[in-house]
Amino acid sequence: MKKIMFNDKYGLTDAVLKGRKTMTRRIIPIDICNATDWKAFNEGDMKCYGTGDGDWVDIRRCASYKIGEIVAVAQNYQDAIDNFNGNNDIAGWGKLIANTQNGSVGYYNKMFTRADLMPHHIRITDIKLERLQDISNEDVYKEGFTHEFVNNNWGNSAYHEETMLVYYDNKGLTKQIRSREPKEAFSFLIDKVSGNGTWERNPWVFVYTFELID
């Protein structure tokens, strides 16, 4: 089984586990499928040319995850133990406890945890390709944002609408990524998660749609 990592700093793992985030975008590497000619990329049927044998290849075949695949949601062992629903899976709980120790390499770093010990899983339901900036307003909310009504603070009941992602910093203080424009709010997030300039660069991305199954 594979695992998939979501950003903890901005609360994205928590958004997945609460069922609020059902979509994720992952930048497609330049050398995907060993492609040598991205200029020949065919948007209509999502193929690229240049795999060494002269074939056109459906890029989705080279995606990290496949439609229908069940993938473990990566957590460090400390969080996995704290969030494990032992009542539903006593055997899984025991296995997790037996294979983890306070201070082990994966106890605080989920990069080093085993997928088979993770208590939560998603199922990939769809994969598509698009440019990062082509995200729709609807998809922004599937990425974990919420639609909020914000008081204008004019001393009356007037309000405006904002797209918002609420998370907590290392001190437990509430932070927000927000904008009146959904796509702008997402652009702020992607530059924080993937580096400044990512939104402006507008790379091709895999868009994975998924459902939380446990």
Image (tube, grey):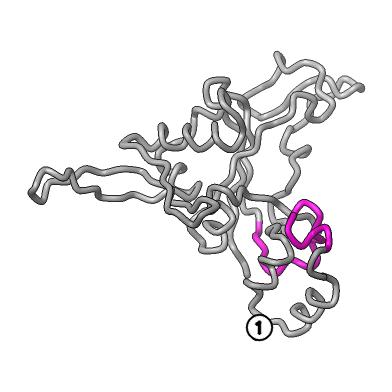
Query: Which residues fall within the magenta stretch?
Result: 104-123
Q: Quadrant of the C terminus?
A: bottom right
x%, y% of residue 166?
43, 51
Residue 65 seen anywhere in this rendered image of the structure: yes
Per the image, is 109 magenta?
Answer: yes
- Between 115 and 210, the residue placed more toward the observer is 115
Q: Residues within 10 Å of mark 1 (few under 14, many from 20)?
A: few
- The quadrant the N terminus occupies is bottom right
Residue visible at 81% across and 54% down? 112
178 or 35, which lies in front?
178
Residue drawn at point x = 82 percent, y = 17 percent: 36
| Residue under pointer 1 | 88
Above or below: residue 48 compared with residue 75: above
| Residue at 73% from the left image edge and 49% from the top image edge | 66
Left or right relative to 135: residue 83: right
Depicted 160 relative to depicted 195: above or below: below
Report the side of 203 relative to 118 (left or right): left
State whether residue 70 appears in this view.
no
| Up/down of 87 relative to 35, above or below | below
In the structure shown, which secondary structural element does the residue marked by tag 1 occupy?
loop
Say which amino acid is labelled 1. Asn
The answer to which image quadrant residue 123 occupies is bottom right
Q: Nearer the viewer, residue 38 or 200?
A: 200
Q: Is residue 122 magenta?
A: yes
